[in-house]
Amino acid sequence: MSNEPAKLQLTGGEQRRVVRERLYRHLLLLCASVTVVVTGSIIFALAFDAVQFFEMVDPVDFFTGTTWITDRGQFGVLPLVTGTLLVTVVAGLVAIPVGVLAAIYLSEYASARARSVLKPALEILAGIPTVVYGYLALIYLTPFLRTLGIDLGTFNVLSASVMVGVMIIPMVSSLSEDAMSAVPASLREGGFTLGATKFQVSTGIVVPAAISGIFASFILALSRAIGETMVVVMAMGLRPRMFDLSAPLSSLQESGQTMTSAMVQAVTSDVGAASPTYKSMFALGLTLFAITFAMNYLSNWIAERYREEYN
Amino acid sequence: MVENDFDRPGASPENASTAHSTARGLDAETAAEQPTAAAVESSVAETPTTESNAGDSSASHPSSERQSAGGSTAAESTNGIISARDLDVYYGDERALRDVSIEIRSERVTAIIGPSGCGKSTFLRCFNRMNDLIQSARVDGRVEFEGTNIYDDDVDPVALRRRIGMVFQQPNPFPKSIFDNVAYGLRTQDDTENLDERVERALKRAALWDEVEGDLDKSALDLSGGQQQRLCTARAIAVDPDIILMDEPASALDPIATSKIEDLIEELAEDYTVVIVTHNMQQAARISDRTAVFLTGGELVEYGDTDQIFENPESDRVEDYITGKFG
């Protein structure tokens, strides 16, 4: 410091800093915009080709038809939608109970040591490539289920769905556990001081207090099940089959097809790029996009709706 | 945990008449083996409690602490309900409580005061084994409640906590309705007979009924801080415990809400034994009958009648603390 009284400089001199700050801001904005641009492009691309498809196939036939045989020009999407929903429901029946109970264990019961083993194990489960799950379903799960006396085709809905369920367990358990861990310890203590047992506190206080996060984890996991492709292509077969309400269980034992695997089939089949079979991929993609988008929206709505303030 | 009728082979008839609320023994067998503070106290407790007793001052001195509980000081003239003997608490290697012995009297307000970090809350949490929930905590010594050392292996902390309730520093209502909050303890015990009536009684007892009548289905989180704290008190008394532990129950509240809580505590002391931790010395002086002073290091320095502690403490350190020289 010089002896002169320090003079505060308020103007000029800092031009470079201002420019630099502005640059940072634009750089960050650019990165943030990538997601929006990509999403927008996808919607546009899907819609563009889907419109061409719907010029060849009546949208009403598409959305209400119950037969999907592309070679014969029958593009009824309902067998694929029910196939997708069937996989989603069964996967949810596997993943939701197991995932939530695992989350309760991890959040409320597990010792630090148990947690240090289980959490990485769950993360590994989440990191396994889906093609491996498909392989496991086809080579191991189906024969295993047969030994239990369940009559299954080589390709069947049941083992594919169960495997998708196993695959999404980590999503349910990890997000639910985050939600439960966020419940303040004071609520648990309140329960304990009233003579509640650990199980009563976990299920009667912690789970209800974390319910919005737990629901959100269900929706995200089910969205993942809806969009799952590789497992169903490998283990479920490629036969679109309308869900038979009168014999729901037989639908599980036989092969089936989902929207995603029909898209794979369309893109890998030997047809011209201008054919309706090829273009059907985009109509299916758009339908799938609409469904998962609705699910995400629902998830946000639920999280808002049931959010609890804890003090 | 089996709840036994008061039927201890070792207990004499006058024990039964004077010991407070012994209808549900924690563990009758253990009780039988140990002639305990409660039994010994009550056998000499035929005279009604007097505020200043010759036995108090000597017994309150840390060096000659509750050896009296073993029966040496026959002048003790109250019925103790819960007592600690040679209690040490460690968090890991750190010693949070140092050799504390104390006897809490029945149907009184006992205040525990002391500077921050002196182990007041740790001590309070020994009475309902809430320190069990802290993994690093280790408790040595005995806490005797109705003739049973609550740290014995066969004591069920869940059953214990049904007898010894607690209200915390921060109001911690469950994110449920007002009714469900108060009913929680009874429901967890499958004790739902006349539930509506008992919830109403608890809310009235906690001086909250008039403010929430008709809003019982509303979320407890919509209540003000002071109302929430009274709700938490109602929740604790709904299960009809013998002792209510309060850990700085008013420290998060404004003055008006604080005075309501204080009124409530004094009223509760007619039926319940209240042990309250506070760092507010005026509060301790206003509402308590007995005061225990903890000083840094987790040491119980002085315990006696509140008037005596505040007007004429024996220990210089307590005097320094009370008069605000430190802490």
Image: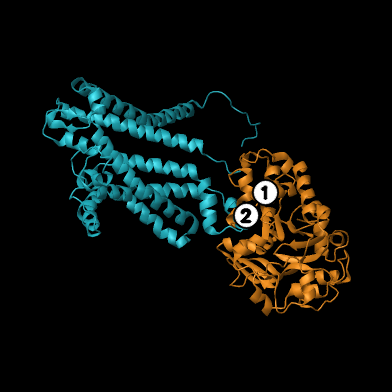
Q: Is residue A158 above or below residue B18?
A: above
* Chain identifier, colour cyan: A
Mark 2 surroundings: few (<14), some (14-19) or many (≥20) residues within 10 A: many
In this rendered view, identify the residue nearer to me: A236 or A148: A148
Q: Mark 2 sits on what residue? A: B186
Whether residue B167 is visible, yes or no, is no
Task: Give amino acid for label 1.
Answer: Val
Work out how far the residue at label 1 is from the one at label 2, CA to CA, in angstroms.
Answer: 9 Å
Secondary structure state at the residue bearing disc 1: helix
- Residue A121 screen position, x and y as percent: 36, 56
Q: Residue at x 26, y 27 (%)?
A: A63
Q: Mark 1 sits on what residue? A: B199
Secondary structure state at the residue bearing disc 2: helix
Q: Mark 2 and mark 1 in contact (Cβ < 8 Å)?
A: yes
Mark 1 surroundings: few (<14), some (14-19) or many (≥20) residues within 10 A: many
Return the disc, 1 or 2, that comes first in the chain's sequence: 2
Q: Residue at x 69, y 61 (%)?
A: B124
Q: In which chain is the residue bearing label 1?
A: B
In which image quadrant can residue B95 be found?
A: bottom right
- Residue B116 screen position, x and y as percent: 70, 56
Whether residue B302 is visible, yes or no, is yes
Task: Give amino acid for label 2.
Answer: Leu
- Which quadrant of the figure contains the N terminus of chain B? bottom right
- Colour of chain B as rendered: orange
Q: Is residue A27 above or below residue B244?
A: above
